[in-house]
Image: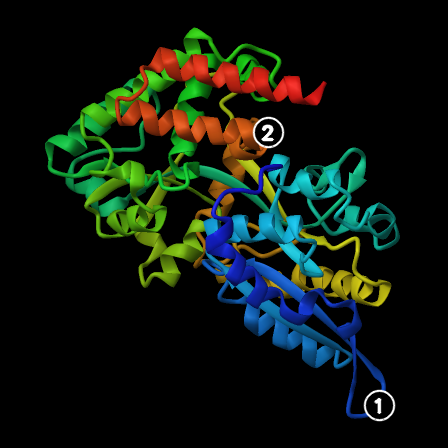
Amino acid sequence: MKKWVALLASVLFVVTSAVGCSSDAGQSQKGTSSGSPKVSISLWTLNTGWAWLQSAVKDFESANPDVDVELTQYEVDPFKETLKVAASSKTLPDMWFTWGGSLGSFYPENGMTMDLTQVAKDHKWSEKYNKTAIDMSTFDGKISGIPMHLNVLGMWYPKELYQKLNLQAPSTFAEFESQLKTLKDKGVTPLAFGSKGGWHTMRLTEQLLEHFAGPELHDKLNSLKASWNDPAVVKTFEKIKEYTDKGYFPMGYSSLDPSEAEMLFYQQSAGIINEGTWFDGNITENGFDPTKFDVFKFPTEQKPTRASVFAEMLQINGASDPAKQEAAIKLGEYLTSVEVVNKYINDYGSPATLGFTVSEKTPHIQPLLDSAKDGGFLITDQALPQEVVQKLFEAQDKVALKEWTPQQAAENMENAVSAYKSKQK
C-alpha cells in the first residue's frame, strides 16, 4: 500500500470533495446555540451493509449535542483508493473504517493513527471486545483501532437449489468438486465470483491453497517464510485454471464486479459464493430472505480445519486535535457498544463486541463463528504485504486469461516476494 499511483486521477476529485472542511483543524469547533463549543468530526466508512450507520450517527449526535459528525460512505474499491490518496495528501478524516492485517497496519506504520493502548486500558476494552479482534487491531504492540467486526468466511449456497439437485453441504474436497460438476451439468454456474479488484476470487484461491499446502506451509507462505514457487502454489493456480476452463466461473469473471456476481447468486443462476458473517445483512438489504440460504465450511481436509478470518476497526487520525480525537473515541465506542450492536443487529454484521444478541434475521453469524473454533488463518489480502497482494491478484487473472501458466504464476509470486524483501533491507 506504499504505492500511490492506482486510480489517482479518478479518485482525486472524490477525495477533494469528500474531505472538504473535514481535514481543516480550524473547523474542529463550532458554536452551539447555547454558545458552548461544538466539535465537528469527519467519519469515512463503506456503504454496502452499513445502512444502519446514518441512524446510529443521528442518535449519537442527539445524545451528544456538542459533537457534529460529517459522514461519508463509499463502495469497497473506491474506498480503498480514496484512503490511499488521502493518506498521501495528508487529508485523512478524523476517523475511518479499515480492515486488519497489512491493510490496517499501513496507517500506524506511517504514523497516521492515534495510539489507543492507554484508552483501551482506561476504558476496559478487554471487558467489551473480543480478544481476537483487539489483537487483530494491534500493530507493533500498540492498539491502533477500535474493534468493530470479527468476520469469518464460508461457502454460501441457496437451499432450494441444493434441494432441487439433491445436494448436501460437502464434507470432502472430492464432494465439493463433484458438486461443481453437477451444478454445471444442470445449467447453473457453480461459482459466483467476480475478479474485478482481485479480492473476491482471492477468497477461493486461499481456500485452495490451504487445501494443498496445509496450515503450516500456508502460514509460512503468508509470512514470507517459505518460497511461493512451491508445488502447493502451482496446484492452487492449476485449479483456478481448471475451474475457469470448465466454465465454473461466470463468463468474463476476470472483469466482473463482485456485486454483479452476488446478484447471480441471489437469482440462483450461480450456486456457491464465498462470503462472511456480514452476508445475512447483504442478503436482506438486496430484498432476499437469508433463511433461504445456508453455509458450509470449505472442506480443506486439513487438521485443524481452519476458516478464513479477519477483523475490522475504526482508526483515529493521529494528527487531529485532541478535542476531535476525544469526540472520535466517544463516537467509535458508541458505534461498537452492545446497545447499538443489538439495536441494529439485523444489519450490523458480525460484531467484535462481547455480549451481543444473535438475531433471527442473521441466522448464519453463529454457525460461521463456530466454524472458526478449531482455528483460523488471516485472510490473504490482509496477511500479505500489499505489493505481494497485487501480484496475487494479477496472477489469478493472468492464469484465467491463459497469459501465464500456473508455474509462471508461482514464479512471479516468488519474484514479488523477493522484490518486497529487498526493499525492506
Instruction: Report which residue position mark 1 lands on.
Output: 35
Q: Where is the N terminus found, in terms of image quarters?
A: top right
User: Which quarter of the picture shows residue 43?
Assistant: bottom right
The residue that appears at 15% across and 32% down in the rendered structure is 184
Q: Toward the viewer: 413 or 342?
A: 413
Q: Is residue 94 above or below residue 81?
A: below
Residue 58, image x, y percentages: 62, 76
Residue 396, image x, y percentages: 37, 27
Q: Is residue 409 above or below residue 377?
A: above
The three-letter amino acid code for the residue at tag 2 is Pro
Q: What kind of element bears circle 2?
A: loop
User: Which quarter of the picture shows residue 404?
Assistant: top left
The three-letter amino acid code for the residue at tag 1 is Gly
User: Which quarter of the picture shows residue 32?
Assistant: bottom right
Q: CA distance from mark 2 to mark 1?
A: 49 Å
Callout 2: few (<14), some (14-19), or many (20+) C-alpha neighbours within 10 Å? Answer: many
Res 82 seen here? yes
The residue that appears at 81% across and 34% down in the rendered structure is 141
Q: Is residue 237 above or below residue 255?
A: above
Instruction: Report which residue position mark 2 lands on.
Output: 385
Number of marks in the image?
2
Is residue 122 found left or right of 67 in the rendered image? right
Q: Toward the viewer: 204 or 251?
A: 251
Q: Residue furthest bottom?
A: 33
